[in-house]
């Protein structure tokens, strides 16, 4: 069984992950610190059977997130210190399986997750029996629609990476996702001799598509705004990785992404700035927008399989 944990408290995420692993309930396939960082496609791609989600989060709370996940095929368990009967009733009306109250109790978590796990296995068993009966009665069973992981959109893959980099809630992440979609379409239709589009061309094409016009003045205004949003998002990714490195140099995300998306010299500069508590506005660390975008695209494609 695969679990995805969404909670703005890293201590709670860590505790839940340890409970799941120690009780041999399955594996944690991912974490997020806010509901705005996940959607149905992302969870399906992660093959998450069970989503554990906090009710109160800063950008998008658990209720609103569950409301956005109406087509999610997995089960949802909500966790919160709020015990309002109205809010709990609303959560159940949206389709959650159980509601666990904080502070997290190990035995309660294990008991609830075992029940949800058993329900999933029972449901799978019933579906298998129904297919077998259909075949025995001479009626071909309708093929079960499997979640599409391999054929997922480039956007879902890029969204996963931006979540890993800690910037999915940044305004510039929406621009980056649009650019990944544009590059994917461009590559499918390009000639063998075509070279990778320039950064200027990418921004202009995406801006024109977003605005639905080729008006040069309007497109240029949007390009400048998008460039600023993207640079801020990339800088936040640099800061996020530098912070992880300071806390734990062997952090898997730091090891995987720091030298891939950035020049490691610049990562080290940002780490020293954070260590000395230097304000971000005074940072000497440089970012390479084109390199970041190119790596994001290549890594997103690679994850498509």
Image: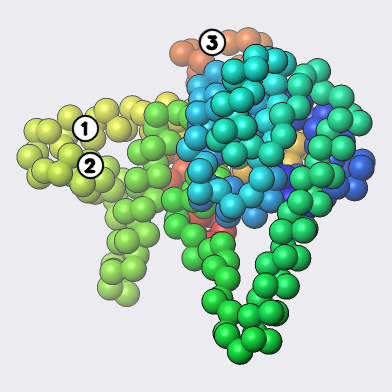
Q: Position of residue 107 (x, y in %)?
A: 91, 31
Q: Position of residue 1 (x, y in %)?
A: 77, 53
Q: Position of residue 214 (x, y in %)?
A: 10, 44
The residue tagged 1 is: 222
User: Do residues under tags 1 and 3 come within 8 Å of each other at their CB atoms?
Assistant: no
> Which of label 2 and label 1 is nearer to you?
2
- Above-or-below relation of 180 to 258: below
Q: Earlier in the sequence, mark 2 or mark 1?
A: 2
Q: Circle 3: is it few (<14), some (14-19), or many (20+) Cα within 10 Å?
A: few
Q: Quadrant of the C terminus?
A: bottom right
Image point (27%, 28%), residue name: 225
The residue tagged 3 is: 279
Can I make out residue 262 in this image?
no
The residue tagged 2 is: 210
Q: Circle 2: is it few (<14), some (14-19), or many (20+) Cα within 10 Å?
A: few
Q: CA distance from mark 3 to mark 2?
A: 34 Å
Q: CA distance from mark 1 to mark 3?
A: 28 Å
Residue 84 falls left or right of residue 219: right
Q: Earlier in the sequence, mark 3 or mark 2?
A: 2
Q: In the orientation shown, which residue stands out farthest toward the front?
A: 137
Q: Position of residue 55 (x, y in %)?
A: 62, 23
């Amino acid at each position: 069984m695969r679990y995805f944990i969404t909670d703005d408290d890293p201590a709670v995420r860590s505790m839940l992950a340890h409970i799941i692993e120690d009780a041999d309930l399955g594996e944690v396939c991912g974490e997020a610190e806010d509901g705005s960082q996940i959607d149905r496609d992302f969870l399906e791609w992660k093959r998450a059977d069970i989503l554990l989600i906090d009710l109160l989060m800063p950008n998008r709370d658990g209720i609103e997130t569950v409301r956005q996940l109406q087509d999610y095929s997995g089960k949802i368990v909500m966790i919160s210190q709020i015990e309002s009967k109205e809010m709990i009733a609303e959560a159940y009306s949206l389709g959650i399986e159980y509601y666990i109250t904080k502070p997290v109790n190990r035995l309660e978590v294990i008991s609830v997750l075992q029940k949800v796990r058993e329900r999933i296995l029972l449901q799978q068993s019933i579906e298998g029996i129904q297919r077998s009966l259909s075949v025995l009665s001479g009626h071909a069973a309708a093929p079960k629609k499997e979640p599409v992981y391999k054929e997922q959109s480039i956007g879902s893959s890029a969204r996963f990476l931006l979540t890993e980099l800690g910037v999915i809630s940044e305004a510039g992440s929406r621009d980056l996702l649009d650019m990944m979609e544009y590059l994917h379409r461009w590559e499918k239709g390009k000639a063998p001799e075509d070279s990778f589009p320039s950064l200027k061309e990418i921004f202009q094409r995406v801006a024109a598509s977003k605005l639905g016009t080729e008006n040069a003045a309007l497109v240029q205004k949007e390009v400048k705004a998008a460039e600023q949003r993207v640079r801020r998002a990339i800088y936040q990714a640099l800061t996020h990785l530098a912070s992880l490195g300071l806390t734990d140099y062997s952090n898997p995300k730091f090891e995987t992404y720091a030298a891939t998306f950035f020049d490691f010299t610049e990562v080290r500069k940002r780490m020293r700035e954070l260590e000395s508590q230097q304000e971000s506005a005074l940072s000497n660390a440089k970012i390479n927008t084109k390199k970041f975008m190119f790596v994001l695209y290549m890594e997103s494609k690679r994850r498509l399989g």
